Amino acid sequence: MNYFEELEKLAEHQKQLLTNVNMDEVLAMADAIIAANRIYVAGWGRAGNNIKMLSMDCSQIGLHTHIVGDNSTPSIHEGDILVIGSGSGKTASMQLFAQQAKSHGAKVGLICGAVGSPIEEMADLTIHIVDASHTNGDYRATKGVMTEVERLVHADAFYPVMQTVCDFIRAVIAEKIGVTPEQMYYNHNNIE
């Protein structure tokens, strides 16, 4: 494997995924987060790590945010939003969380690498990060779609692109409600 060449191809692949994200979906998610009384986030694995960073960013903006599963997370209600990060949109625990949030009158947002997933069917809004190079319609390339080297390097491109989309959501929210980087820094964790 030519590492530098594969790194360049990965950067181009991620750029393609990012520029194919529908800006209307991103802006709708940002508006829904701004409109919510409280923001809850949930995800598993890499998607869970990314969505937790969105929660951290929202807290630094000054919004009320919680991570599902933490002991300090209060009950969800009408006027709140649960934002789920899931590459497949099929994760069983995330499906359950979406059902529970909906049953309590909350909105559900989804950041997903697949189209038409079970969680999307429950979601009020979805940001799609779809990889057109994956002919199986999933967020990961299956054997035979890419070479083994390409699968190693590119198969999980969804996750870093998801993080960039979350960073962009943070910037949109901060700009829309007039929060400066200095104000965000003031809210940055200072018990480290």
Image: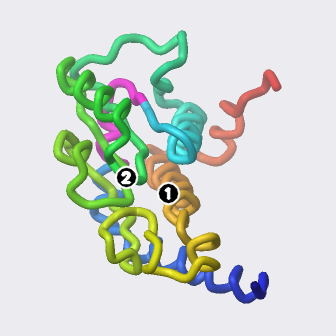
Residue appearing at x 32%, y 17% in the figure: 76
Q: Which residues are magenta?
A: 30-40
Question: Looking at the picture, how far across and down is residue 58, in whole percent?
Answer: 52, 37
Q: Residue 88: which numbered mark, if any?
A: 2
- Front-most of 175 and 141? 141
Query: Could you give the CA–CA distance between mark 1 and mark 2, rounded to whole angstroms?
Result: 13 Å
The residue lying at 46 percent from left, 53 percent from top is 169
Is 182 in the magenta?
Answer: no
Residue 45, labelled with which disc? none
SS for callout 1: helix
Q: Which residue is drawn at the image coordinates 31% and 31% (left, top)?
A: 81
Q: Residues within 10 Å of mark 2 (few under 14, many from 20)?
A: many
- Name the colouring of the figure: rainbow
Crowding near pointer 1: few (<14 within 10 Å), some, many (20+)?
Answer: many
Q: Residue furthest right?
A: 192
Choose between 136 and 122: the one closer to the eye.
136
Q: Is residue 116 left or right of residue 162?
A: left
In this rendered view, identify the residue nearer to me: 43 or 28. 43
For the C terminus, the quadrant is top right
Of circles 1 and 2, which is in front?
2
In screen coordinates, is 175 left or right of 132? Answer: right
From this view, report whether residue 118 is shown above or below residue 171: above
The spot of residue 106 in percent (x, y) is 24, 26
Residue to which mark 1 is pinned: 162
- Residue 27 image offset from top left, x and y in percent: 33, 57
Residue at 44%, 48% (x, y): give it: 173
